[in-house]
Amino acid sequence: MSDKNLESFVVIDRLTVGPVDLQPRKVSAPYIVERSDGKTEENVFVYSFEEEVFDPDNMSDQNLASMMISQIALNYGLFCREINFRGIFDNTDKAFLKSMMENTSREIYINKLLIANPFVIDDYKGLKPERKSRYTAAKILFTAIPGSGVKLYWEHWEMDRRIHSVLSSGGKDSLLSYALLEETGKETHPLFVNESGRHWFTAINAYRYFKSNIKNTGRVWSNSDRIFTWMLGKLPFIRPDHKRFKSDDYPVRLWTVGVFLFGVIPLAKKRKSGRIVIGDEYDSTQKTIYKGITHYSGLYDQSRYFDNALSRYYMKKGWNISQFSVLRCLSEMLILKILVKRYPRLQQHQVSCHSSHEKGGRMYPCGNCEKCRRIAGMLRVLGEDPKNCGYSERQINDLMKSFAEKNVKQISSDASHLFYLLLEKKLIPENEYTRNMAKPYPQIMKLRFDNERSVTRDIPNDLRIPLIRIFLEYANGAVRYSNRHWEDFDVLSSEEIQSDYPFEISFSNIDTEEKQKEYLWAELTWPEINERLTKVDTAILPCGSIEQHGRHLPVDIDYFDAEYLARRVAAACSRPRPFVLPAVPYGVSYHHEDFKGTLSVTNNSLAPFVYDIGMSLAKNGIRKLVIINGHGDNAPTLNYAAQMINRDAGIFVCVDTGESSDEDIYRLIETPNDIHAGEIETSTALAIRPHLVKMNEAADRTIEFENPYLDFSSGRGVPWYVRTKVLSESGVLGNPTKATAAKGEKIWDIMIAHLVRFVEEIKNADPETLHQRKY
């Protein structure tokens, strides 16, 4: 065992990142390393675009650029005493960077320092495992750049979720993702990241094909490879000859996809692409434990957890982007099978080799590395000719012979099944080694679903069934992991196939969604609630009303929308998700009682009722209660109840009656004083329950006031009360004829984004310091 500990790896005094130099086609920023011996070295990290994507005077673009140039630094939290990000960041950015750095520090500690790493010199090997609450050694600072005193406002990007951007590399995953989306009729943009090093060689064949044939192809050049290599020179525990040492692994970095991903976001924004599709590493994205330390078994940044964390970040930023992979249920062999059988015109451009070389203007795989052995072996098993993607006959023969003594880098079941098929088809030599390696795992050729690596709801609803139908043409059915074994199941007839994708607006039977049972208070047993209370102390209470909403909307709008919003917010939050309580359906609606269907309770009934709920929650162990109020006239009553709960139970209680999102929503609509059954509520109903909206009954009842202090939409308006019938014979206060489903989707996006951001910060905060500034 080495006498080194984690402190021995802290070799950089300070890493300073930024500030950015932003130009229409380029963003760059210094990386400054101050070493413990007093020496300072500097390099410049660059992203360069083929088209204009930035407005240097736009604060939002400055913010995005600051996040882009910060990504490389997430790999060095273990090795620095201080990391200073100089740029424009809001609290969402800061929390994201700190969280992702800590996750990466833990993964690098286990996968690069504890587990045997050929790049680490002998003196630093044999590190003793340490269980720590925080593995990042660096103190994280965020320094505002001079002249950036302008406030960074939350901004809702105008994106279109019918437009898909594929993070493209020339590998089988991105080629297949593009082909699948194109076949299903989606507008698809292959976006390539041109690394400065040899990694770009793997993408050149595919990029040239797409550039010549697909008008939506985009590219960003980055010198990230050079910065990574430069940083290795600052780490004395890495062997000096690392450049000459051939390995399919990186010496220390594990946050790489994030570097590429943020590089293509400016292109996605310009193209209004509301979806970003990435690849998959099924064999290295499982939660596991190594010597008592919980972590991922490999690449967090290609897992479903990464997709969900990024989608949640985009939501909280208002960027209106969702990120996912369409391939998570497929083994590597199934990915290659579908690509080569269904889309051979694209598979011929695949170069899955980091040691590829140029010959005659085209890139060819080296034919000698582990990746080449794996690809050639799978293609032979599938009855395909590896020569079609660049391997020579001699290379293929040598690669097949090499199976006699060398393994492939796959999850053990996948590798064993590959050896089994190769032996069965007599494609590799049979000896003691290959016989020991070979074992059948029939699930490899089936769609695999499990709660960690692949769940159906991680693919958006409109893509899910069409893609799974294509997959089943090539797979031998589907299996689900349950009770520690794989069992066959009919995925297309399953309940899960209908569940909502949590990061986009859609409507399904939310009462039966499997994913919600973990946080719906009413559907849990008392032992389940007791167990969850050890992990989460936050609850959401939806409150609404049953009241008239004109001739065109149902009377449950305020009740249904509050409950729907609470569930969608909880679904989009990170684990452990907040509890969602049974909704309070009735509200203070006396002013609507001139219209039949309205069921009103008094303030003196509602306030004590909500107070009792809050006090009972506090006795259960809830320390933070967020009340989502779907009916504006409940606000005084709910605010009073919240005050009393806080006074008597001492817990955090807040009421959101739209304050978190109204400012952005009113910029989106056309109608002034749109407060009841008008443009806003009709639009949100059209987005999720169009079958209940009678647009032929919708009529304009826009109201105007001579006295500006009575104007509901004025920032200077005073609260005042009146029976609705005095202002409107139909019960409408606004203009529902301006409503559209598209507006409704944007409004839902805005409301959910703001509340997810708020609830996440509330949920993760210490109750004692909840009100204090964190950064």
Image (cartoon, helix red, strand yellow):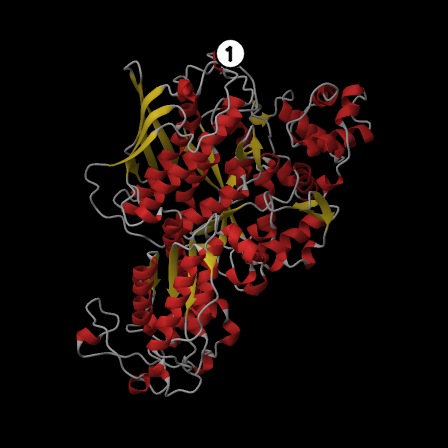
Figure quadrant of the C terminus: top left
Examine the rendered structure and indicate whether residue 667 appears above or below residue 350.
below
Instruction: Pick whichever, 215 or 496, lies toward us.
Output: 496
Q: Is residue 712 left or right of residue 370?
A: left
Instruction: Pick whichever, 537 or 383, lies toward us.
Output: 537
In the image, what residue occupies the spot 48% across and 66% down? 582
Q: Quarter-wise, where is residue 464 in the image? A: bottom right
Amino acid type, callout 1: Asp
Q: Is residue 245 left or right of residue 772?
A: right
Q: How many marks can you see?
A: 1
In the image, what residue occupies the spot 41% across and 34% down? 101
Q: Secondary structure at mark 1?
A: helix
Is residue 386 visible in the rendered structure shown here? yes
Examine the rendered structure and indicate whether residue 235 appears above or below residue 523.
above
Q: Is residue 271 left or right of residue 406?
A: left
Which residue, given by chain and number where applicable, does mark 1 sit on? Answer: 122
* Mark 1, other Cα within 10 Å: few <14 / some 14–19 / many ≥20: few
